[in-house]
Every structure is written in C-alpha cells, then in structure tokens.
Amino acid sequence: MLTFSELAPITEGVVMQFVQEQTVHHLLTDSRKITQPSGTLFFAIKGAFNDGHDYVSALYARGVRQFVVEREDAIPGVKDEDGLEMSFPEANFLKVENSLDALQQIAQYHREQFFLPVIGITGSNGKTIVKEWLAQLLSPDEKVVKSPRSYNSQIGVPLSVWQIARTHTLGIFEAGISQTGEMEKLQKIIRPTIGIFTNVGPAHDEGFENREQKTAEKLRLFSDADILFYNAEEKTLDKLVKQLKIKTFTWSMQGPADLQILAAIPSGDKTLVSYQFQEEDYRLEIPFTDPASVQNALHCLAVLAWRGLSPEVMQQRFDKLQPVAMRLEMKEAIHNCYLIDDTYNNDLAGLSTALDLLVNQKRHQQKTVILSDLLESGLTEEMLYSEVAAALNNRQVNRLIGIGKVISRNKEKFRAGTEFYETTADFLAHFKADQFHNETILVKGARVFGFEKIVGLFGKKVHGTVLEVNLDALVHNLNFYRAKLQPETRIMVMVKAFAYGSGSYEIANLLQFHRVDYLAVAYADEGVSLRENGISLPIMVMNTAPDNFVQLLRYHLEPEIYSLSQLRSFLEFIQTEKSAQFHIHLKLDTGMHRLGFVEEELATVCDLLKTDERVKIASVFSHLAGADEAIYNDFSQQQIALFRQMALQIETNVGYPVIKHILNSAGIVRFPEHHLDMVRLGIGLYGVEATGTEQSALQTVGTLKTTISQIKEVQKGDTVGYSRKGVAETDLRTATLAIGYADGYDRRFGNGTGEVLIKGQRAPLIGNVCMDMCMVNISGLKDIEEGDEVTVFGPELSITELAKRIGTIPYELLTNVSPRVKRVFYAE
Ligand SMILES: *Cc1c(COP(=O)(O)O)cnc(C)c1O
C-alpha cells in the first residue's frame, strides 16, 4: 500500500504540508462520492465545469487528510510566515503540475506492482458487455478484477486499475477515448497483455481527423500487448493491425481467420454457432439472438478457444451467460417509498456505485438496502462481506435486508437491526408492506436471485403507460449548454410544471448533484415540495401572491417581484418577520408584456426597496418574446439593450451589483454575447433545441410508452371508435393502445394525424382518441402481438415532429403528460 510520502517521487510533486505519515487506500476525484475519509487521497482536478479545489475545505471538514492540489492558494495560510494558524492543520498536501496526471501516474505505479495478465478492451461498442461476459465466463478459473460499470475514461481507468490486489489473477479493463493523445495515457495505466478491439463505429468521430486515425489511436492501447483479438471483417482495423508488429487472433464470418465462424443461425431465443478452430469443427449455442450480443459473444468465444477451454466447458459457461443490465431504474413505490432498482452485476464495485446513488437521494433520511449474495471472485468471503458491511456503514444505510445463503452466514459482520433470508422466496413469504414507509430502498441483487419479484411488490400499480426519463441524456444536455457559457456565468434551471412534465424532485435532485446555481418554479407549492424532498439549492418562485408569502419565507423560497403592489405587500409582510435578509428577484418587462416592471416604475421600486435594508435583490431579469425565431432577432436585441439599461439603473440606484439574466434555452444558443451573469435553461435540458439549429447535439430525455391491449380484425365498411369516425376503407388490423387523452395524449392526434411506433414501424391513429385508449391501424406491419410495447414519443419519434402535426409546440406535449402516467427514471 502506498504511503503519502511515496507520492512525491511518483508524481514529481512537491510536498507543501506534511503533518504525519498516512497510507492511501482510496483515490477520490469527486467530492460527492466520499465514503470513508480515513485513507482517502483527494485529487483536486479542474474539470470543464467544476474545480476540485473548491471542495478541499468541505472534504477537510468531513475528515479527509490527504490532498493532491495544483494551486497553492487551495490551502490558504500554509505559507504564512507570521505564524498564523494554518487552515487545514491536520492534512498532508502534495502540489503537482496537473492533478489528473498525478492520479494517472499513481495508478500506473500501482499497476507496475503486479504481474498478472490483463485484458484491455477498446472499440466503439460492446466494451462493457464483453468485459462483463468475459468476467462471467472466466470466473470459475480466475479471480477477476475489472472496471466498474463503464469506467473507461481518463479518470475511470485509473480508479479501476487502483482496485488490483494481490489476490487477483486476471484483470479486465476497458478503455474509451474521445480525442487524440488519450489512449497512450490509458495504455500506460492498463498495460494490457491481451487486447480486444470490439469494432469500429461512428462514436466520437468528431474528436479525430477520420475513422482511420481514430482506429490507429485506439490501437495504441495494445502497443505492448502479447496478442490482439479482433474481427477480421473490420477492414480499416485489419489493415492497420497488419502494419503493426503484434501477434493477432482473428475471427470472421466471411473469410479465413484463426476462428472461422461457419454459420450463426438464430433459433428461438438462441443462436446456433458452428465454427472452425485449429482445423476442427465445433458448435456452440449462444443464449442471445440480437446481432450486437452475438458479436460480443463471438469475441468471448475467441478468447476462450485461445485459452484452450474444451467445447463442453465452454457450452456450460455460455449457457449461464447473463445479459448485462446497463440500466438502473428509479421510481415511486408504495407508502411514499422511493425505489432504486439496480440489477446490474452484483459485485463490490457495482454495489459501491449504487450506494453512492442512494446517498445522493436526499428525499428520505431512512435508507434501506435489499442485497443478495455478491458474486465477487477476487476476495475471500471473509474479506468480501467485511467490505460490504463497511460500505453500508460508510453510507449510513439504516437497514439491510440480506438475501442468500452466503450473506446470511456472514450476518455477524453487519450491525444489529438487519434481517437475513436464505432465499428470495423466503423473503417474499415474510414480506409485510407496512414495514416500509417514507424511505429510499435500494434493491440490488445478482440476477439469479430474481429480485424483479421484490421490485414488483414495492411498485405502485402501473397501467401500461409510462414516461421513461433518461437521466444520462439530461446530464448530457445540461453539459451541452454549460459548455457554451463562460465559467463565471451561472445557470438557473426552470423546473416549473413538474420539470416540463419529467418529474420535479428527481430532476431537481440530479441538478443539485450536478451543481447548477439556481432552480425556478412557477408556484410556491412546487418550491415547497422540492424543499420537503431535500432540495437545498436556491429556488426562485415566479408567481407569488400575499397569501403564500408565509410559505416562501418558511421554506427559503425567493419570490419574483413584478409589480409595485406586489412589492408593497411584500415589504409590509416582512415588517413582522425577524429574518436578517430576504432575497427577491425583480422581473422587468422589456417587450414581452406579460409580467414585470416598466422603465417608469424603476425609481419608485428603488425608493421602496430602500425602506427596508433587509430586502436584497438577488437578481434582476427579463424574458425574450421571440428567442426561438430568427425573424425576431432585432426585437430580441432591442429587449436585451433595454434590459441592460434598466438593470444598470437599478444597480446604480441601490448601490450594489445584482445578478442579471435574460436568456432562455433558445437565447443561450442564439445570443452568446448576452449570457450576462446567469442564463435560464428550460426546454433544452429536456432535449428540445428550440432554435432548431443544434438539435442533433441534444439527446431525447423522455420516452412515452404504452402497450397494445388488444388486436382486432376490422371488416371493410365497419368503423373504429366513438362517433364512428374511423372508417375501414378496406379490411384492417387495428391495435387498441392503453393511452388516451386523460393520459395527456392529445385528441387532435386522432384520425390519422398522429402516429406511434411499434417494433420500429409507424402506425397511424384510426378514429378518435378516447379518454383512456386509442386505436392505431397496424395493417401490413410485421410481428405485432398483444402486449407489445408502443412508443408514443421518444428518440425515434420526436415531440418536435408530433407537435407540428397538431399545430402546437413541444412544450405543450411534454407538460401534458398526465400525473397518472408513471415516471420511471433510468441511468446507465
Ligand atoms: C419557462 C421560462 C424560461 C425557460 O424557457 P425555455 O424556452 O424553456 O428555455 C425562462 N425564463 C422564464 C421567465 C420562463 O418562464
């Protein structure tokens, strides 16, 4: 184990402050993921949107005592010659040129201490699946250490490699890059002895000159490997590999290769593969049929064949191959509980990431974990469950329900108050719903434990229709807008109207985690509900009336003030209040003519504000009437000019600077020179780029799904639905869907105006939309059955297109999705 004083030579850093020797157990790069302060070494990394140096002090308060920093001012006082007290008297500090480099050097040093074989995986798709499957397939023979989830970045790779311990006999790590120069660094950290290049696709093309250059760059991962596995059908790759002096093992369905795939024929839910290896013919059944899974499985087959596993053993192991759930879901559950459903492979690293997520749900104090035996091959049972117990303790999990023989026989390692069951059936038999109230429950089980039954018990009743909210896409969109801002420009996110229909608390919690500066809601009760669910960011409330001033103050909500009468009543209201300060936001009307002060009122506003020094203007803002459309650019510019002038007048008059903001999502894209002190992000976060010019850079956040309740054959001349509007001109097949206008599916979509997507095929509406149902024409569509999933809108059927069809805007479609439609949040 490294000690702090060993770090300086490894990183060429300078020890700025040394208090006492400590060992380094945990590497931390994200202050929010702190679990065990002792033994943690924090790297203050300057990222695109955040600077780790800003969190040194908070981490010190939490007990972290070892830091790697780039800037001396991160530890003010340490250089003080007058003997003043140091700010962080108990901590060791190492100063380096670049903290990320230091992290990588330390991981590289760690890797060099071990001589185990390491499989390195890169490529455009399938890295994570191939990694997880190889771990499953090889775990009977090896003690495997691998990257958690898809930790394959410049930060993820060092953290993955840091896990290698003496007990491991094989490492499997993935590497992903987005630009030139990155792979060389990852190669030094992973140092793969065995390489797998999955495939060459379009992902991250933008970071490279062309596909060939990208491929060549990725191949650097294998510069020191003993052997490289790849699919010889990848022509660019094949050509480049042949120029390298590296031993290869190829597979191909088309031509000669070390492993020649003679046939891969789907049969039921399996694929029958026949292949030739070392001049012998063999067969293997793969328990998947989709092309991507088959390709991933063939990479694994190649490695297993090369290792000399017998065909019988291979078949046994392939039979047990489990799909890798890349997705973790969050949803409302019974008795005001909140459920995190994570059936991702249940190993220690996966448990840690799930626990981090649990900790970051601020909604309930009470946190429960339902956990199965862990499938971890690298540690002894003793060590494994001690670590599990520590991981739960560190995150202050209140209650553990352990399910499985192994976790049960290790029960004394856990705190009192836990429950254990040998099987899932045992737990289900004893389950009492009333033992779960107002808590967040993480359900994490290896697939063999069948925890979906447990999830089913907690789930609220679902009626076929759900709005799935992709949290990764939301973060992607947030970062798209952030990247456009100057570092000092703040970001306020509009989470009004149930976060544009997506679910206010979950979105707000994620935004809080990603450190936006402000939230805004339309009404006080929306703000109250966010506060009651643990949201502590500043919140602006746009519509307030004297009768909810009380609520505002109690919940630390900041009102938008837009009229003199409103300002007067607020000032009057606070006369009897004791707070030292009240934050308000002044709305100016610069041409929208909705709410806001006009120029002539400003003098009075400022005079009034001076009557109570406790009122502080947190910000001054206005709203553009036509930011979406280029034809209104001139008008927008006039509004901006007027706003700047009015804001200046206020600042001069009150004598202190205020935050100024005028741009919404479209404005951020259209007027980069007017971002001012803050911007207000709305629809863009949810995946709609309102100017239409950069739509392809955003990802769709919401997918509205329903199911087919019944399929009907309708005779020519008959009609479908109310008022006999859907007339069958010929014999038809129709599907009745479990969604109607009460779910927010607009009646205007009826009679052919709208379309839905079933198994990738479009089906037009037939007849009127009913309250809870509607019908679509599926004549001529293939493979459609009752119970099939139907996409109402989503990545392949955009709300922008649908909105146009009924003459409205995407905003309306999003916010119309009714509260009775269950929201399910998911992330990778
Ligand atoms: C809703 C709203 C926004 C966000 O607008 P988008 O077009 O969704 O980005 C910004 N400012 C105000 C005042 C709003 O009401």
Image: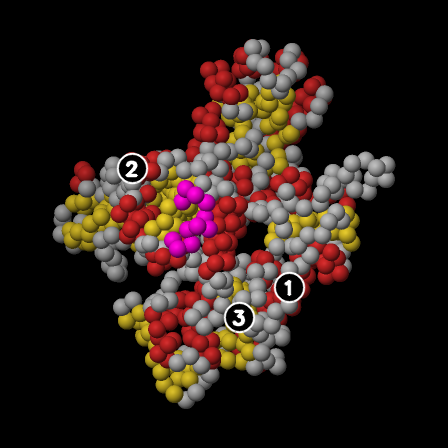
Q: Residue at x 47, y 80 (%)?
A: 306
Q: Which mark is residue 169?
A: 3
Q: Residue at x 43, y 43 (%)?
A: 416
Q: Secondary structure at mark 2?
A: helix
Q: Quadrant of residue 283?
A: bottom left
Between 324 and 503, the one nearer to me in the picture: 324
Q: Which mark is residue 511?
A: none
* Residue 683 coordinates in the image, percent (x, y): 49, 39
* Pointer 2 residue: 741
Q: Earlier in the sequence, mark 3 or mark 1?
A: 1
Q: Residue at x 68, y 49 (%)?
A: 66
Amino acid type, residue under disc 3 in the picture: Thr
Amino acid type, residue under disc 2 in the picture: Tyr
* Image quadrant occupied by the N terminus: bottom right
Q: Earlier in the sequence, mark 3 or mark 2?
A: 3
Q: Quadrant of residue 103?
A: bottom right
Amino acid type, residue under disc 1 in the picture: His
* Residue 25 coordinates in the image, percent (x, y): 61, 55
- Discs 3, 1 touching: Cβ within 8 Å: no
Q: Quadrant of residue 604?
A: top right
Q: Is residue 670 left or right of residue 472?
A: right
* Pointer 1 residue: 110
Q: Earlier in the sequence, mark 2 or mark 1?
A: 1
Q: Secondary structure at mark 3?
A: loop
The magenta stretch spans which residues? 408-418
